[in-house]
Amino acid sequence: MKLTKRMCLLAILGAALATPMLAAAPGAWEQPAFELADQIAAILGPGQAHLTIRNLSSISNDEIPVIRRLLAEDLRAHGVVMAGAESANTIRVTLSESAKDR
């Protein structure tokens, strides 16, 4: 069954991205970004999408562009092309963590 054009994805990545790598090395985000892109692409399929990332975690804001770039590259490898806000598809990623894991 084909998904509607107005699909909106929300990914909360506490365990997948934030918790184990709070002081991460530069390559530490590659595998989590790849796994998330794989999951998103399985739902969305190929096409255009607008990507937003919200950081509610203790990950430094300096690391967010790296995470965004890796995720966008991995999505592109799955056939999901980044588009502007006018895109019919929006991927919203929220980075968060559990307070007990800090």
Image (cartoon, grey):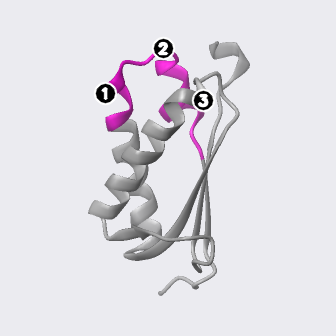
Q: Are marks 2 and 1 in contact (CB under 8 Å)?
A: no
Disc 1 crowd, CA 10 A, few/some/many (<14, 14-19, 20+): few
Q: Name the residue under label 2.
A: 23
| Magenta span dominant secondary structure | helix
The C terminus sits in image quarter: top right
Q: In which quarter of the image is residue 46?
A: bottom left
Mark 3–mark 2 distance (CA, rounded to whole Å): 12 Å
- Tell me the SS state at disc 2: loop
Segment colored magenta = 12-30
Residue 36 is left or right of residue 94, and the answer is left
- Position above or below: 56 against 74: above
Q: Mark 3 points at which residue?
A: 61
On residue 63, the disc is none
Q: Where is residue 68 in the image (x, y as percent from the top left)?
A: 47, 46
Q: Does the magenta stretch include residue 34?
A: no
- Position above or below: 11 against 47: above
* Sequence-earlier tag: 3 or 1: 1
Residue 72 is left or right of residue 89, and the answer is left
Q: Where is residue 78 in the image (x, y as percent from the top left)?
A: 30, 64
Q: Where is residue 19 in the image (x, y as percent from the top left)?
A: 55, 22
Tell me which amino acid carries mark 1. Gly
Q: Quadrant of residue 73?
A: bottom left
Q: Residue drawn at (33%, 53%), measured in percent from left and top?
A: 74
Q: Position of residue 71 (x, y in %)?
A: 41, 49
Disc 2 crowd, CA 10 A, few/some/many (<14, 14-19, 20+): few
Mark 2–mark 1 distance (CA, rounded to whole Å): 12 Å
Tell me which amino acid carries mark 3. Asn
- Position above or below: 34 against 26: below
